[in-house]
Image (cartoon, rainbow, N blue to C red):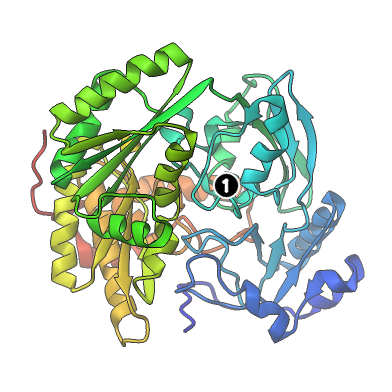
């Protein structure tokens, strides 16, 4: 089913296809229905739209030529990496060019001495760590889709992963970007040094969802592999106790490399899928990984173990070796596909809350789930409060997708109500436009539109994504917001 939340009037200009064929090899311009079908959505398959044409350039010069052409003809452009995004950020436009960076898949340079690497945007996240492993280095951000997702897409969405608590998101692990502007000009932001003068345009571009420029090269930071990494798996008989344990660990001044939480439905799904030896009767589990120097890890493992038991853990297992540590993580990283085995469809949400609100928010999600009649499995980065509720539904049943979206919207508005945000790493795309109206007021949204206009005056780069129009917010706000404040049940605060 095609569902396109597009406020733009369509203005197809088929002559762009002819012009693209003059710029690119024949095989690099896709325009038939069969050729366009694989590009009609990203990982958020609930929204589908085939583009007017797909362009697959291989060089920076070709990207520049494409952008000059589209700017001259005023044809919108949507950039796409691996298509693993979960917010519809790469959803095509019926009258636009889908610019695929799939052929930009080379690692240009590795600089072990300065712990950095220059890569093209189509390079897979995991491929960077594999390429630098012989130097004792790795790239820290590790989304669950790291085997497939591209570094360009990671920059566009500011992706994180299970180790973002200690090592940060993409924005904390890149040094420089090379981009092509909407007019086809090549420019750079950031620096190979630790800092660069002037405005922090590197941070502005990271997470901008392809709305400000086309990324053609990324300089990433590399880190030395820690001397030792060890993981603990703790079982709890309530999500409140598991949430409280997270606060206790952080409050003790310990910053784990990763601190992840799964509730019972997610535990059962993951265990049935990968057989990670998870305790299937637990209400929740925490996976806590500590890394660093050997002596440091030994001390922290004992401290965390005591904190977990004091917080009410019914069982705490410490990985005996690296194989067991990886098995703990295998279940967590396979949680999304595992849930796909127990439900015809699921809607993966992405919101962030203060850590102290983990227990109350999970309880409220359970209430919202019961009210909607749709089950929810919760998998998330507990250490930084980034939730990933998976709403289970069946798109074959009329109205269930709409119910899943309504439930997802309520969860995101709940996140805002307790002091959080509507996204942690998946981005806004087309999925969270209404909830952006809840988080930001009209003055803030106006400033976002001003930034967009400074880089893209004609609004050709990924239009209709990430930043809602004030008109849309006025309509949504009339239904959901009164005097700028959401009306939500009062939640307990610790």
Q: Quadrant of residue 84?
A: bottom right
Q: Tell me: residue 184, above or below residue 315.
A: below
Task: Name the residue that disc number 1 marks.
Answer: 154
Who is closer to the viewer here, 419 or 81? 81
Horizontal relation, residue 349 to residue 466: left or right: left
**What residue lies at 21% left-to-right and 63% top-to-bottom?**
480
Q: Quadrant of the C terminus?
A: top left
Residue 58, image x, y percentages: 83, 56
Q: Is residue 432 above or below residue 277?
A: below
Q: Residue at x 50, y 46 (%)?
A: 143
Q: Position of residue 116 (x, y in %)?
A: 70, 27
Quarter of the figure with residue 390:
bottom left
Could you tell me which residue is drawn at 52 percent across and 48 percent down?
Answer: 157
Say whether residue 82 is left or right of residue 1: right
Q: Secondary structure at mark 1?
A: helix
Outermost front residue: 320
* On screen, residue 311 above or below 348: above
Residue 390 appears in the picture as rendered: yes
Asked if residue 254 lies left or right of residue 70, the reply is left
Closer-to-camera residue (292/115): 292
Image x and y of residue 411, in percent: 25, 57
Front residue of this view, candidates 138 and 59: 138
In this view, the residue farthest toward the top is 295
Would residue 482 be seen by someone viewing this image from the given angle?
A: no
Q: Count the marks: how many? A: 1
Between residue 97 and residue 233, name the one nearer to us: 233
The location of residue 362, given as percent across then percent down, is 19, 51
From the viewer's perspective, is residue 42 above or below residue 309? below
Local crowd size for mark 1, using a 10 Å CA cut-off: few (<14), some (14–19), many (≥20) = many
């Amino acid at each position: 089913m095609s569902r396109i939340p597009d406020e733009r009037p369509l203005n197809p200009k088929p002559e762009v296809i002819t012009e693209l064929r003059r710029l690119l090899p024949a095989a690099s311009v896709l325009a038939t229905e069969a050729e366009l079908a694989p590009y009609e959505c990203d990982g958020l398959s609930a929204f589908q739209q085939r583009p007017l044409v797909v362009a697959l350039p291989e060089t920076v010069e070709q990207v520049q030529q494409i952008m000059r052409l589209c700017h001259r003809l005023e044809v919108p452009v949507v950039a796409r990496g691996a298509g693993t995004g979960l917010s519809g950020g790469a959803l095509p436009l019926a009258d636009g060019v889908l610019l695929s960076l799939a052929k930009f898949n080379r690692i240009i340079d590795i600089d072990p001495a300065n712990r950095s690497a220059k890569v093209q945007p189509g390079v897979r996240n995991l491929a960077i760590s594999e390429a630098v492993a012989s130097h004792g280095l790795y790239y820290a951000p590790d989304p669950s889709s790291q085997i497939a997702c591209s570094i360009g897409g990671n920059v566009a969405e500011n992706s994180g992963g299970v180790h973002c608590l200690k090592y940060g998101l993409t924005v904390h692990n890149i040094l420089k970007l090379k981009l092509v502007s909407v007019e086809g000009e090549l420019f750079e932001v950031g620096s190979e040094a630790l800092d660069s003068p002037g405005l922090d345009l590197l941070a502005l571009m990271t997470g901008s969802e392809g709305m400000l420029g086309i990324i053609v090269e990324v300089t990433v930071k590399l880190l030395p592999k820690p001397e030792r990494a060890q993981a603990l798996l703790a079982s709890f008989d309530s999500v409140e106790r598991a949430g409280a344990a997270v606060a206790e660990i952080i409050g003790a001044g310990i910053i784990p490399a990763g601190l992840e939480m799964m509730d019972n439905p997610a535990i059962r799904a993951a265990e049935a899928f990968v057989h990670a030896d998870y305790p299937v009767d637990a209400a929740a589990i925490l996976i806590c990984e500590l890394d660093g120097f050997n002596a440091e890890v030994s001390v922290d493992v004992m401290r965390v173990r005591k904190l977990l038991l004091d917080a009410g853990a019914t069982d705490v297992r410490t990985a005996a070796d690296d194989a067991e540590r990886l098995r703990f993580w295998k279940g967590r990283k396979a949680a999304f596909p595992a849930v796909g085995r127990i439900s015809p469809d699921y809607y993966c949400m992405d919101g962030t809350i203060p850590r102290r609100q983990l227990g109350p928010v999970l309880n409220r999600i359970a209430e919202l789930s019961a009210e909607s009649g749709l089950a929810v499995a919760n998998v998330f980065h507990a250490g930084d409060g980034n939730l990933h509720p998976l709403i289970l539904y069946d798109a074959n049943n009329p109205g269930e997708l709409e119910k899943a979206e309504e439930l997802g919207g309520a969860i995101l508005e709940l996140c805002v109500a307790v002091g959080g945000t509507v996204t942690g790493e998946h981005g806004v795309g087309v999925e969270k436009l209404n909830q952006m109206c809840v988080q930001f007021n009209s003055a803030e949204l106006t400033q976002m539109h001003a930034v967009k206009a400074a880089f893209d005056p004609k609004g050709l780069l990924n239009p209709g994504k990430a930043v809602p129009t004030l008109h849309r917010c006025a309509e949504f706000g009339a239904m959901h917001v009164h005097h700028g404040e959401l009306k939500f049940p009062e939640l307990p605060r610790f």
